[in-house]
Image (cartoon, grey):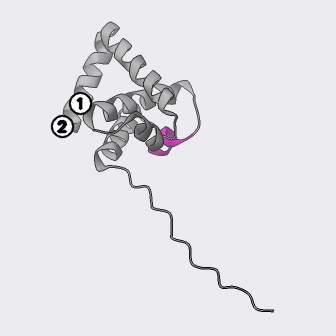
Amino acid sequence: MMTAAIPDLPKPPEIVLPLCARKIVKAVSAAYEVRTAELYGPLRTARLVRPRQVAMYLIRRQTKLSLPQIGMILNRDHTTVIHGIKRVTDLLETEAEFREFIEEMTAKLA
């Protein structure tokens, strides 16, 4: 009995983060003293939620990435990205200290 040769399947493309998005996630993780891998991970603890939301906000503000693309980078759904960006935007309006922090982060990333 002869077996048919199975053609080699093409390798799936590697997911390469845009340099700017990677830089933002790294800067946010350093500022909040959390590991970068934790921001990409599944945990939703309070110590990770805010940094992840800040990363979403900064990536959206400083890149041309779409909401689904930002979600893919951080392993989240695009609706989670919408919520995170809205949460940061709301905090910017009400908390002066947080607004200063975001301004410093933006300056560091420029």
Q: Nearer the viewer, residue 38 or 34?
A: 38
Residue 110 badge = 2
Which residue is label 1 attached to?
Answer: 106
Q: Are marks 2 and 1 in contact (CB under 8 Å)?
A: yes
**Main SS type for the magenta part?**
helix
Residue at 41% from the left image edge and 38% from the top image edge: 70
Q: What range of the chain is rendered magenta?
A: 36-41
How many badges with numbers are in the image? 2
Binning the other alpha carbons within 10 Å of mark 2 as few (below 14), some (14 to 19) or many (20 upward) gives few
**Residue 66 within the magenta-colored segment of the rendering:** no
The amino acid beneath tag 1 is Thr
Residue 74, position as x, y percentages in the image: 47, 40
Residue 64 sits in quarter: top left
**Residue found 36% across the figure and 35% down from its top:** 28
Q: Is residue 35 visible to us here?
A: no
| Residue type indicated by callout 2 | Ala
- The answer to which image quadrant residue 89 occupies is top left
Residue at 28% over, 24% down? 102
* Residue closer to the observer: 35 or 44: 44
